[in-house]
Image (cartoon, rainbow, N blue to C red):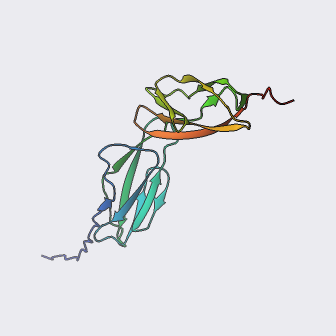
Amino acid sequence: EAILEKQITIFHSPFSVFAMDTVFEAPACNPVSIRFTNQSLGADSFIWDFGDGSTSTNPVVEHTFTNSTNYFQYFQVYLKTFTNQGCKDSLPPKYITLYPLPRTDFVMDTVSTCSPASVGFSAPAEYNGLYTWIFGPDDVFATNAIHTNRVLVNLGETDTTYIISLLSQNQFGCTAIDSQELVVHPLPNPDLK
């Protein structure tokens, strides 16, 4: 009776492991940068997949996630490892949840007016939004309403430029700020002839 012997080579599989410098137990506000470090064992090559269409083959990489939507967005981060013999491994994905920033593109009734001026301001609507209007160092007003008015006065002899700022907070707790200039001309001087 003949015995057939054949040698079989079994190659090791890589073991995928990575670390993040920031742990996401809760979602973050847009944008967020995270450093990823490949700590895999037995791999000859690897590739990061960040779930946003970008990849990397660097062992340590800092990646910035951005959310351009008005809703929260999930990113699935994978590390795939390979050996020269064709063996591969991949971890279940790590999820990055990113909240959007609130809109801050507010509208003013005018950008130039005469003193005293009642000017209307409108914030972009945010669900459960909070708006903090900053009309000057001592003039800050927080509200849930998207419209507000303010009387601006110029008692000087030259134009006064107000820097009007809107700090918006959305329902996710994320904040953003935008500023615009508004010029208020002085009252005419009746003593000038």
Query: In this rendering, would 119 be left or right of 31?
Result: right
Q: Count of labels shown?
A: 0
Quadrant in the picture for residue 178? top right
| Vertical comparison of 145 with 2: above or below | above
Task: Name the foreground residue: 25 vs 85.
Answer: 25
Q: Can residue 70 be seen in this view?
A: no
Q: Can residue 116 be seen in this view?
A: yes
- Residue located farthest toward the left when viewing the structure as drawn: 1
Residue 128 position in % (x across, y down): 43, 26
| Vertical comparison of 156 with 89: above or below | above
- Residue located farthest toward the front when viewing the structure as drawn: 191
Task: Name the foreground residue: 17 vs 150.
Answer: 150
Quarter in which the C terminus is drawn? top right
Quadrant in the picture for residue 73? top left
Quarter in which the N terminus is drawn? bottom left
Residue 166 position in % (x across, y down): 54, 35
Q: Residue at x 32, y 48 (%)?
A: 24
Q: Residue at x 49, y 55 (%)?
A: 54
Q: Which residue is drawn at 25% across and 74% down?
A: 9
Query: In this rendering, would 131 be left or right of 151?
Result: left
Residue 162 position in % (x across, y down): 63, 37
- Residue located farthest toward the right when viewing the structure as drawn: 193
| Vertical comparison of 46 with 4: above or below | above
Query: In this rendering, would 102 be left or right of 106?
Result: left
Task: Name the foreground residue: 157 vs 104.
Answer: 157
Task: Name the foreground residue: 175 vs 49.
Answer: 175
Residue 53 position in % (x across, y down): 50, 52
Quadrant in the picture for residue 29? top left
